[in-house]
Each structure stands twice: as C-alpha cells, then as structure tokens.
Amino acid sequence: MQPSSTFVGTTAVVGAIALLGSGLASAAPVKWHDCTEMLGVEAEYLPPGMECGTVDVPVNYDDPDGAQTEVALTRIKASTGQARSTIFGNPGGPGNYALNFWNPPLDGSAPAGLYENHDLVAVQPRGLYGSNPMVCEVEFVGPNAVNPLHDACFGTDPAYMASMTTENAARDTNAVREALELAEIDYLGVSYGTAIGTDFATLFPEHTGKMVLDSNTHPDWRWSEQAEQGAFAQEQRINDIFGWIAERDDYYGLGDTPLKVFHSWKWVTDQEVGGPANLTPPPAEIRDLPVELRGTALERPALDVINTTAPGRARVEGFARAAALQGLTNNATTGLYDATVGATYSEQAWPMLAHVLKYYNDGGQIARVDYETVGMMLAAQENRSPIYRTDIEMNSIITCNETAAPSNQLGVMAAKVDKATGGNRLTTRAAVEAAGDDCVGWDPIAQTIDPNGDELKTKPLVLHSEDDAITPIAGGQRVAEALGGTLVTVGGGDHGVFRTGNEAVDRIVMEFLETGIAVPGHVPGKPSPEPLPKWDAADRAAAAQEGMAGAVEGADDWYGTGRGDTPQATTAPAPGQAVQATNATAPAAATAPAAPAPVLPAPAPLPTPQQVHDQAQQALQGVAGQIDAAAKSLLAPPAAQ
C-alpha cells in the first residue's frame, strides 16, 4: 500500500527552485494549508503568524522516484520581519507531537530575541499526526503472534514501517530545508530530538548552522540500554523527591528524612491496583535511628546494617506480598506511583505531588474500584490495545527498528518473573527494557549513525542537567565528545533546560545563536519550587466575608490542612462493590497526565474559589465508575470497538 496524503483541501504551492551557488538540490515544493484545518484548532488558539504545510518525501531515500509520503511542518516567522536564521526544532520522543514545539509561552517568558529574530520551524516525523499516520490492520496478527504490533504494522505496509527511523527523520528535516529554499539551518533538539540533530549534523554538515542539543540521548545506547539506564536514574531521582519533601517537614509533616517520607509514600502505593512498587528505600540517616543509638558507638554500625540489608529486606517483603496475591486484592486507584515517576522529569511537579501525598496521609479518602475491574486493569497492563496506530506506537516502532541487538525473550521472561514475585518495580523495568521487551519478535532493520562533527563549521552547544533521570548525563558528555561540542552542565535534574524559566541557560543559548560562541562550564539549575499555598486564617476571613464558605470547605477537603480534623480511616469495599469517588479523589485527578493537545488555548479569566469548588465537584463525580468503564473498554474485542 502506498502511503496517501493526510490532508486534502485547497493548497497553495510554493516552488522549490534551486538557487545558483546555494548548494540547494531540487526538492518537492511546500504545500501550504490553513492551520485551523490542518491542526484542528480554532484560529484564536494559534500563535500569531503561524504557517502550516506539508512536503512530499520519498518513503525510501535510496529510491527517490519511488513511493512518496508526506511530512507536516509549522513555521512562525520572525516578528521583526528580518530573520537572522531559521531554527528547526524537535521536542523528543520518539513520538512526541512536534507541530506546536515553537508555540510561545502563555506567560510571555520567551527568551529575548528568539521570536523577534528567528524563523522557527517544526517538522513532524513521518508516521505521526499530520505526517501520514497509519492504522495497522489486525488481520495480519495470528493467534500465536509473538509481537502483534510488529505483525499488524509490517503486514499492512512493510516498506513504510521500515522507513520509520531516526536517520529518515533527519533526512526528512533536510527535505523540508530544501523545500523552504534554505542553504543552512540552525537546530534545537530536546531529548530524542538530539538524536535527530546528531544524525542531521553527521549527514548534512554543510547545511548545519548553529545547533543546540538539550538533554541528550546517548548515541551508543540506542535504545534498550538508554531505557535501562533511565530506569536506574529515575530511582535515584525519586529519592531526591523524598529528600525535597523531608526538607520541608515543617510544612508537609510527612517525615524529616527521605526514608520517613518514603514510608509515608509507601503506605499509599502499597494499596494500589497491581501491588506495591517494592522500591529499595532511600539510605537511612541518623534521624532514622532510635534516639538511644544516636551519638553512640553503635550509630555508624547500625546505619551500615540498615542500608546494606535494605535491598534484601525489600525483596523479601516484596516476595511475601506477591505470595499473598496482594496485587489481586489491592483496589486503590490514586495513581500515586505513576505520578511520582512522572515527577522525575521536572522539579516543578514536586509541590503538587507532595500535597497529594499529604492529603492521603492526613486521612483523605482513597478512590477505589471493584474487584472485577481490578482483574481487568491488571490484564490491560499486560496486553496492548487491539488497535495499532503508528502515531500511538511510534516509540516502540523507532526503538525496535533500530535497537542494536535483537531482544532476549528469556531475559524478558526472567525480569517479568522477578517483578511478579516482588522485585523492585524500577529495576525490573530496567531489566525488561535491557532485554528488549517491546521488541520480542522484532529484529532490528536499521543501523544507527555514529555521530561525527569533523566537518561542522560551528560546533554544537550541548546542554544537560547533572541529575537528569530520563537521559542521564553520560549522553551529553558522549555527544559533546563525538561532535566536538561545548558542554554546559546545569544544576538539578530537569529534563529539558532551555525555555523552561532558567534565565542563565536562556542567555547562553541566545548568545550562541547570535554569535556561534559558547564557553564550557556549569550554570545553576532553577531554584527549588515553593510548596503550594495553604488556606490560612486570613484567607478564611476574606472568603467568609464574600460568602465563599463552601469554597473554603472544599479547599480544606483538598489539602487536609487547617481544620484540625481527625483523619478518617479508609476502608476497602466488599468484593464487587464499586465505590463512587467524591471530591476526595481530586488529587488523583490532578496528577493524571493530560491528553496532548496540538495547541494550548489562550488563558481564560481566573475563576473564583467558589467556581473552582463547584467545577471540581461536578468534574470528579463518578471517577471510579469511569475507571471501570475504561478498563472494560480496553479489553473489549476489536469488533466491539
């Protein structure tokens, strides 16, 4: 099947004429589209001056006259009308939506000069929304399929599937460059976007201008080892979260050491559907010892014993819980574990996570589902949806097409047995990733490109957080070495550091884009975020005067602060009984990941506290029932979808 165009309708064609002396090759023209139609959003939500288009590219660059597909692009032109350069960008993934990558921040905090002096282009990788996504036919999946995603998608269009690689994403970027009649482009890549950038710089050094690579994937770790190393780093970052909360014990009251906060967290996550996470506890500190041992000759030996035996004790406890089938009997649906792992991306998520944890430890009601739904949710965790789409499964498609070594099915099975018998959830995930779980039955079909910057006129600026848990800093060090780039490390562990509010980083990047000059070194990370505000006595008085007593009550229910209420114990429902969620489930809803949207809407006027309370009450009714329905839908046969 030859891929077909995603968009139809009126288009304006801009010729791609080769410019004398520019080194540009003849290329397919840009087909310009109405952005409201192409992106599916209202005009008021689009950045001023945004342009949208598509470019036809070869499915196989070794056969440029063969089958074609298309890639989508957006462009925001320099507001001054005098662009000093065109910067292409990619936000990462593989599989992240790229077309809104350059949308200006709603708070007006954009780095000075970025939108004024540069045209900004984002190219959507092939197979994603706007760039010819494909729904894979389930008829190609046999009853004994080892990897249904592979069989469905390669059965539907093997040539197109084989073309979904990082190298082709770089080549598609170059095709768009040609279509826009640009001799040279600057580039900003974040996370997986750095892999596209290093491939582009290696393949097309003569067309590479100033390149900024932010939070780098490791060129030698594509891709199983990248996932494995990230899983190990996330466990350390979770301990950093516990440490941040412990430093604010006077505010949260969850423990004054990381280990004490861990136990406050573990009390909730041990009740989750699927069973406890069984993470290894953070190292014990002196304040974790009984008072009688502190300051004595036994203090250090006691700490050594506790910390040395911690992994083993966690493993034994995990095995005991697994043997008791706790994963089948748990029915809490707070989402706290997933929210905690998600918070490893950015410190700015830590205050909300801490408030949610405080809410539950102060006696907040835990949302639960019936036991029939527990079984469905557990089954859904182990099985893919029966519908396979390239825009949903792109991470697996790219990594399995490129992973250096074929997967180890025995290794995957061993890691899953370890998890099922109480192993640490993050380290067992690392083992599963290292063994290539997603890629069982999927032999790699593409070789990754070794990065080389010998022919680059301007060496790249490489940015990386010291404690990045998603792409560990070894990736930044390796990219800087391979391309001869300038490495600037950033304090903290945020994943992605440019355009995130760190003014020092923004200044370094903008100076580099203007001059091509960067100095290796280190800059501090952003200050640690402050805890979310509580309702104090003054707030209560003001709210009461304005007739908002209900809103104050709602805030108390949310945060569990200020009233001095006695925490109410939560009880599990009897088997078969679904407990409907109330506003007590608000923290779980607040931490659920939002569905990605192509373009963020303009900010609306701030609602009053009473409106917030009323809207939250309406939105949160029946959350547990919705979980029931969602789990049943996931497991419905394809014909019922």
Image (cartoon, rainbow, N blue to C red):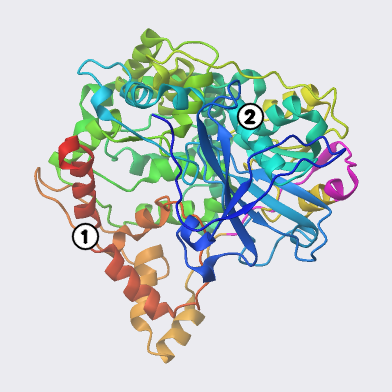
Residue at 77%, 55% (x, y): give it.
118
Residue at 47%, 51% (x, y): give it.
353
Question: Residue 587 is drawn in which quadrant?
Answer: bottom left
Amino acid carrying label 1: it is Gly
Residue at 26%, 38% (x, y): give it.
273
Answer with left or right where residue 10 lies relative to residue 210.
left
Residue at 52%, 69% (x, y): give it.
43
Where residue 181 appears, as percent x and y from the top left, is 75, 45
Disc sitting over residue 622 in the figure: 1
Nearer mark to the viewer, of 1 and 2: 2
Confirm whether the magenta stretch covers residue 528: yes
In the displayed structure, 171 sits above or below 114; it is above
Answer with left or right where residue 407 lies relative to residue 148.
right
Instruction: Check disc 2: other Cα within 10 Å, few if <14, some if 14-19, many if 20+.
Output: many
CA gap, disc 1 and disc 2: 41 Å
Q: Is residue 544 visible?
A: yes
Mark 2 highlights which residue? Answer: 217
Of the image marks 1 and 2, the number of the one nearer the N terminus = 2
Q: Is residue 486 visible?
A: no
Confirm whether the magenta stretch covers residue 339: no
Chain part drawn in magenta: 511-530
